[in-house]
Amino acid sequence: MNHRKLRIDWILTLLAPAAALAQAPQPLDAVRLTAEQFLVAQVPEGRGRVHASAEALDPRLRLARCEQELTAHLPQAAGFAARVSVGVSCVSPRWTVYVPVRVESELPVLVLRNAMPRNAAIGPGDVEIRTQRVPGLASSYIGSVEELAGRHLKRPVPAGTALTAELLAADILVRRGQRVTLVASVGGLEVRAQGEAIQDATPNGRVRVLNLTSRKVVEGQVESRDIVRVSL
């Protein structure tokens, strides 16, 4: 009887580690790594290298160990920003946890040499190219001096700032009260009339113009500083 009991105890001892492993919670580092790898794989190719860093999860979080490979997804309508929430899921047993991930890009960007005021136009001498790690994706950062043409600063910007599209606005090409030439194509012929802009407009923007001959207000597209093309 004692031999039988000893044998049962020995078998249970061998099975105990396996049973404990099966009941152990899902490692949170694996959840974080899944979110990071998924996000990097989803980012469109562009200039620079993308880094994704998931925030530490609450150590009190106990997720049942997943029997299959973890999967990840972006919530519906979520975009790629400097901070993204990635859903990491397990099919069996079924659970989902959302992991905050910080996104950064390492790339060459245009950086202001000196502080500049609102509405300032930026020239080649005002910037320098630096390779640095910046929040978000490369697509929002200005990478060449050519991209600055026809644009100005929306607000004052301090020295050392990496320039983004959000900091810039298109220059006003046609101003309210300015005389312009209205151009329309009719049956292969080009008709011109003098007009007066009744609002500001940017390059290729839409603008309302008073036809000085007919005294009617028409809308057209800015073609140049003094030409507005109207569709008839």
Image (tube, rainbow, N blue to C red):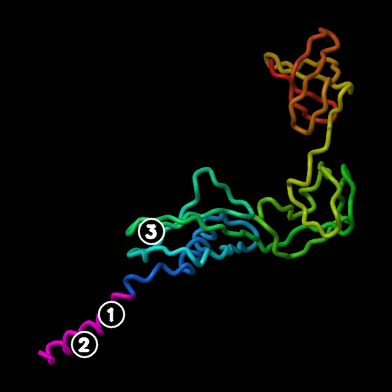
The earlier-in-sequence mark between 2 and 3 is 2
Proximity of marks 1 and 3: CB atoms separated by less than 8 Å? no
Q: Residues within 10 Å of mark 3 (few under 14, many from 20)?
A: many
Per the image, the residue denoted by label 1 is: 16
Q: Residues within 10 Å of mark 2 (few under 14, many from 20)?
A: few
Q: Name above or below for residue 65 compared with residue 209.
A: below
The earlier-in-sequence mark between 1 and 3 is 1
Magenta stretch, residue numbers: 1-20
Per the image, the residue denoted by label 3 is: 90
Residue 89 versus residue 131: which sits nearer the camera? 89
Per the image, the residue denoted by label 2 is: 10
Q: CA distance from mark 2 to mark 3?
A: 35 Å
Quadrant location of the C terminus in the rendered image: top right
For the point 29% across and 77% down, the residue is 18
Which amino acid does the dot numbered 3 rest on? Cys
Quadrant location of the N terminus in the rendered image: bottom left
The reply, left or right, for residue 83 in relation to residue 183 is left
Q: CA distance from mark 2 to mark 1?
A: 10 Å
In percent of width and height, residue 95 lies at 39, 56
